[in-house]
């Protein structure tokens, strides 16, 4: 069995304009490995290349250079995508579907049978505490409720890898704590989790290893336990010379 | 397959819960109901059918074409702009399945909405007894063959304009082909014109209890409002022509002994003025066929096929462009495709000296050829006139507009979906 779930080798991404002239080098020669069963955090201020990296891992963007593999396969391979769950930065739900229909829709896309999809949807609705509102259209949900539906839909296909893009974005402290507890529980069950955040505190609580990105490059990488309390100083030493506003946000 | 069904279900649910389908259905049925009062008919069954089919059902069809185009351009574009599309893309689903699922859903909803106004016509007792007719035209040399024969004479003629003599052979042939289509035959007073209809004799023998009719059309370009009188004689049939004002008349033929050639229809002009007709376009033998309801059903299949093509085209544009740009492009192309046949017909002469005019005409001709299947609303105009919607035409339209072209457009849409996310 492949021990390395995600592998990026010298990956770069340069966005180009209409005339194919390079405009932004979002990611530059990035190497990354996420091993089975670990919770890996991608950290960095806004514009550091976290979302671009995630999109390349999901197969939504192709790298300009280098190689991305997911479970040893190209990221757009169906076999790789069948083992993947994704929670985007915002929930992006279909507003006219109910919570149960949303989960059943995504379960269907993961080739679950109708009966399996129904039972999985019920199980996840209970897990995210939305059973009472399962038959209400998600268009009327609060941000926190919508976030929980989105998280459940990321888990509906029983993924081996969960990719969370800013999972606590816009949540109140109670909901944030619930999400963190859930991620820890999933990690305990052996699920591999890749999460991004621009808040150091979020990653310190749940991640085994983190990588700090700055201007598309790896500024630091290591175990949270090893970096420990010196993570903030470590970050300051590596990337603190630039944007004070982004830095303050990051250290919040 | 499961994911395709899920995308289909999601799209249908969206169309139903957003009230789009209900609003379209209400507008369609409302117009069909109002058409009974708004449209003025000549108080005959044929007249009522013509008005209700041409303007009642035609109006509903036009509404659906515009609506399907609008919804189709947004089905991928708006999902991409709301970033919901990426949630589907990260699942094990091919971009083609996304486009094909949406196409099938949109076509199914359009077909369901169109079924109701058609059903109102089927249920209408005044049309249940009506029959439609096969339209047969005289057997003549094709315009292209005639053009080839005319070419040498035309080029040798001293009155041929120098531009034509300098033009490419293909351009001159196209010009001559158009002239051949419009070729008038003059039937002088007390003269007889004969047109060949192979197989007429055998058909008449095999269908002894069925009578025929002939439709004659008179062009407005000539002063044909004068009294036209004469007789029509076919193989074992005869009829009397008497027309004062109409531009098209249907003459019923009755069985009886008459002096007519085998497998031919003869028109003897007994009026005071010569009669001018384009035999290829203006003389039609009408052979009774199946009922109005069956032909309406076939028209329905043709209309659904055209709507499906429009849906696939809208999805294709939405996959590559933002929604407003896709919608604008779609509407402009729809308008151009609707106008191009009349432009091509009115300006058949490619011997334009102005370069820009030549380029413009060439482009219009290209659009006209490319969009022939969509721009032609022939199933409704045929049905309105009581003509048969032929099975072969229905099968061809269905195969092309519902299967081949949408399949190709959805494959291209799949490529565009992947390309677009890179930007």
Image (cartoon, coloured by chain):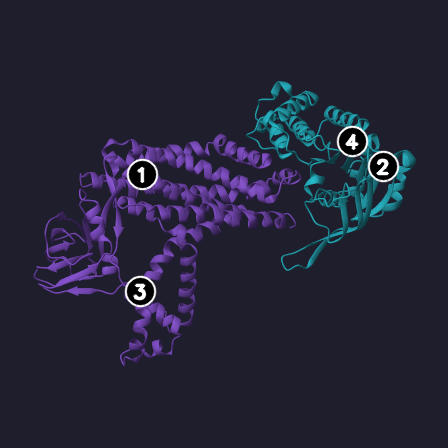
Q: Which residue is mark 4?
A: A191
Dot 1: what SS?
Answer: helix
- Which hue belongs to chain A? cyan
Q: Are marks 2 and 4 on the same chain?
A: yes
State the quadrant of the N terminus of chain B.
top right
Residue B361 in view of the camera: yes
Q: In the rendered view, tell whether residue B316 sits above or below residue A104.
A: below
The label on residue B143 is: 3
Query: In the image shown, does B227 or A229 lie closer to the viewer?
Result: B227
Check whether the beta carbons of the residues at disc 2 and disc 3 lie within 8 A of each other. no
Question: What chain is tagged by disc 3?
Answer: B
Q: Which residue is mark 2?
A: A209
Query: In the image shown, does A54 or A175 lie closer to the viewer?
Result: A54
Q: In the rendered view, tell whether residue A64 sits above or below residue B307.
A: below
Earlier residue among tags 2 and 4? 4
Relative to A195, B199 lies left or right: left
The label on residue B284 is: none
- Discs 2/4, front: 4
Question: What chain is tagged by disc 4?
Answer: A
Q: In the rendered view, tell whether residue B151 sits above or below residue B119.
A: below
- Which hue belongs to chain B? purple
Coordinates of residue B119 in the picture (x, y in percent): 33, 33
Check whether the beta carbons of the residues at disc 4 and disc 1 lie within 8 A of each other. no
């Amino acid at each position: 069995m492949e021990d390395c779930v995600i592998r990026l080798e010298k990956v770069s991404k340069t966005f180009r304009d209409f005339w194919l002239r390079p405009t932004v080098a979002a990611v530059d020669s990035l190497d990354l490995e996420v091993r089975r069963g670990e919770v890996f955090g991608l950290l960095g201020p806004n514009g550091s290349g976290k979302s671009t990296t995630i999109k390349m891992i999901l197969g939504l963007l192709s790298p300009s250079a280098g190689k991305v593999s997911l479970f040893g396969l190209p990221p757009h391979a169906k076999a790789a995508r069948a083992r993947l769950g994704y929670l985007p930065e915002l929930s992006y739900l279909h507003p006219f579907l109910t919570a149960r229909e949303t989960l059943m829709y995504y379960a269907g896309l993961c080739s679950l049978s109708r009966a399996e999809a129904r039972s999985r949807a019920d199980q996840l609705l209970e897990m995210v505490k939305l059973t009472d509102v399962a038959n209400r259209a998600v268009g009327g949900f609060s941000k926190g409720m919508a976030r929980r539906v989105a998280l459940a839909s990321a888990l509906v296909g029983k993924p081996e890898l969960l990719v969370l893009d800013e999972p606590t974005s816009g949540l109140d402290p109670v909901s944030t704590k619930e999400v963190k507890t859930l991620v820890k529980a999933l990690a305990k069950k052996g699920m591999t989790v890749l999460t991004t955040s621009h808040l150091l505190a979020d990653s310190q609580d749940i991640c085994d290893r983190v990588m700090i990105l700055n201007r598309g490059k790896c500024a630091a990488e290591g175990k949270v336990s090893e970096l420990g309390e010196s993570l903030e100083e470590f970050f300051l030493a590596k990337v603190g010379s630039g944007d004070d506003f982004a830095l303050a946000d990051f250290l919040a | 397959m499961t994911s395709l069904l899920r995308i289909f279900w999601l799209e249908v649910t969206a169309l139903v819960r957003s009230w789009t389908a209900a609003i379209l259905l209400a507008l369609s049925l409302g117009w069909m109901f109002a058409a009974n009062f708004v449209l003025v008919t000549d108080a005959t069954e044929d007249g009522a059918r013509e008005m209700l089919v041409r303007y009642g059902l035609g109006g509903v069809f036009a509404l659906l074409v515009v609506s399907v185009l609008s919804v189709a351009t947004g089905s991928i574009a708006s999902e991409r702009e709301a970033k919901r599309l990426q949630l589907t893309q990260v699942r094990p689903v091919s971009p083609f399945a996304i486009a094909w699922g949406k196409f099938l859903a949109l076509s199914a909803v359009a077909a369901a909405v169109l079924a109701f106004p058609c059903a109102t016509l089927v249920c209408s007792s005044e049309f249940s007894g009506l029959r439609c007719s096969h339209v047969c035209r005289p057997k003549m040399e094709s315009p292209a063959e005639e053009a080839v024969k005319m070419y040498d004479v035309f080029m040798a003629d001293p009155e041929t304009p120098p531009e034509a003599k300098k033009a490419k052979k293909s351009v001159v042939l196209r010009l001559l082909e158009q002239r051949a289509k419009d070729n008038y035959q003059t039937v002088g007073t007390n003269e007889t014109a004969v047109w060949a209809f192979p197989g007429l004799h055998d058909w008449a023998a095999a269908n002894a209890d069925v009578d025929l009719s002939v439709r004659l059309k008179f062009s407005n370009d000539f002063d044909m409002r004068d009294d036209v009188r004469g007789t029509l004689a076919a193989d074992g049939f005869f009829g009397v022509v008497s027309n004062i004002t109409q531009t098209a008349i249907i003459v019923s033929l009755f069985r009886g002994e008459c002096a007519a050639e085998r497998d031919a229809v003869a028109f003897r002009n007994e009026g005071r003025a010569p009669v001018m007709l384009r035999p290829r376009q203006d003389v039609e033998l009408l052979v009774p066929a199946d009922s109005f309801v069956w032909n309406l059903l076939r028209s329905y299949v043709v209309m659904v096929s055209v709507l499906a093509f429009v849906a696939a085209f809208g999805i294709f544009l939405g996959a590559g462009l933002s929604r407003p740009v896709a919608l604008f492009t779609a509407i402009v192309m729809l308008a151009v495709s609707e106008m191009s046949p009349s432009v091509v017909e009115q300006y058949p002469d490619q011997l334009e000296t102005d370069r820009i005019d030549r380029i413009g005409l060439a482009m219009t001709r290209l659009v006209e050829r490319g969009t022939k299947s969509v721009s032609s609303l022939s199933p409704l105009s045929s049905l309105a006139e009581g003509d048969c919607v032929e099975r072969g035409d229905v099968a061809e339209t269905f195969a092309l507009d519902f299967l081949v072209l949408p399949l190709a457009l959805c494959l291209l849409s799949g490529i565009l979906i992947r390309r677009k996310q890179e930007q």
